[in-house]
Amino acid sequence: MAQVTERHILDALKKVVDPDRGADIVSLSMVNGVIIKEGNVGFAIEVDPKRGPQLEPMRKQAENAVADVPGVLSVTAVLTADRAAAETSKEEPTRSTQNQAAPDRPASLAPPGVKHIVAIASGKGGVGKSTTAANIALGLAVRGLRVGMLDADIYGPSQPRMLGVSGKPETNQNNKLEPLVSNDVKVMSIGLLVPEDTPMIWRGPMVNSALQQMLRDVEWGDLDIMIVDMPPGTGDAQLTMAQQVPLAGAVIVSTPQDIALLDARKGLSMFRKVDVPVLGFIENMSYYICPKCGDRADIFSHGGARTEAEKLETEFLGEIPLDIAIRETSDSGQPIVIDQPDSPHAAAYLEIADRIWAKLSEDGETSKRIAPRIVVQ
């Protein structure tokens, strides 16, 4: 296989011309963050955010140009806000080390027509957050609500497989991506835009830009609620969503054992620091019932999330057992809420979905929350 270098990538991108500026994107210094790993290439194209939706064809042309380079196995290009816009933001006169809500500032990443955006989060990986998010989204759709699913887990996107969707989204006449649909849930994920086995080798700014594009440049339409499957932990991607998106609330998923609850506590603290309401805790893998003998085993302990919720003065939304049927149905692309709608496990997810919707409905102001503005003195 030919050795791919940054020079090869830049030479290929010299064939791509900015349609408004009449010069190639390399000479205009629009290309940055080129990353090459074992034939997988990623890079960012800096543009004026106002031109972002119109430049989707240019982004695709750039990907195609690099894909023709010998030795390149996969290509992912993202559009990012240009430096001029970033420099302008540094000159704002009001500065503080505290989080400040800016009532007069529009929520730039809020998709029009979406009433509530709810983050499903966890302090650590491996607690079943994505499975929980998928079943909650489907449960809300079963109740007749208009639902969207944004898979914000850039490094480990799993919603395409769990929700049984595949293929690249099409671009409509407005130069926006059309989300795929699974059981009446609109779905968008980075996993739909790159091959499933392609490693995501992006740094923080490219991850943030991808999240922004999946919110801003997707034709979500009118939704009652958008469920966001957050990445595990409390890093860049989580802060981007918490700071730039008017989240109506966050739900924390944890297993019952102490180490998972410690990380869940950190997740709750992060949301509270940026003024995102925490709607409650879910205890996943709460207990295990042997399918042969019927005996119950608390493999990861039991009740820890309920106790933690009480300590932290937030609601306990429910518990989900550790069961092979939940795993098998999620792997098959038809989660248990759809595959076994009359099962007790589906009923547990539906009850949690009902509680989340009830909390949003009883506090209509949460949907009007302005994303907090954080500036540094």
Image (spheres, rainbow, N blue to C red):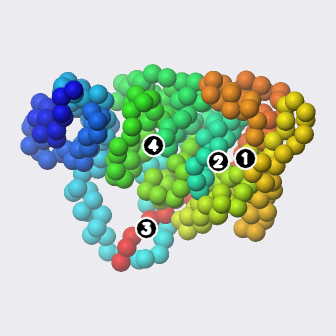
Q: Which residue does the image show at 18% across and 34% down from the upper left?
A: 4
Instruction: Tell me the residue that label 2 is attached to.
Output: 127
User: Can you tell which of label 2 and label 3 is closer to the viewer?
Assistant: 2
For residue 374, the mark is 3
- Dividing the picture into quadrants, the one containing residue 349 is top right
Give SS at disc 2: loop
Q: What is the three-letter code of the residue carrying label 4?
A: Ile
Q: What is the three-letter code of the residue carrying label 1?
A: Asn
Question: Of marks 2 and 3, which one's residue comes earlier in the chain?
Answer: 2
Query: Quick one: 194 or 298, which is closer to the camera?
Result: 298
Q: Is residue 183 above or below residue 281?
A: above
Pointer 4 with pointer 3, Cβ within 8 A: no
Question: Of marks 4 and 3, which one's residue comes earlier in the chain?
Answer: 4
Residue 47 in the figure: left or right of residue 197: left
Instruction: Tell me the residue that label 4 is attached to.
Output: 154
Q: Which residue does the image show at 38% across and 25% down from the upper left?
A: 171
Calculate the distance from the C-alpha at mark 4 to the C-alpha at mark 2.
17 Å
Point out the image quarter for the C terminus. Answer: bottom left
Pointer 1 with pointer 2, Cβ within 8 A: yes
In percent of width and height, residue 323 lies at: 76, 36
Instruction: Tell me the residue that label 1 is attached to.
Output: 284
Q: Which residue does the image show at 14% across and 31% down from the upper left?
A: 12
- Dividing the picture into quadrants, the one containing residue 214 is top left
User: Can you tell which of label 1 and label 3 is closer to the viewer?
Assistant: 1
Calculate the distance from the C-alpha at mark 4 to the C-alpha at mark 3.
23 Å
In percent of width and height, residue 211 lies at: 43, 45
Question: Of marks 1 and 3, which one's residue comes earlier in the chain?
Answer: 1
Pointer 4 with pointer 2, Cβ within 8 A: no
Calculate the distance from the C-alpha at mark 1 to the C-alpha at mark 4.
22 Å
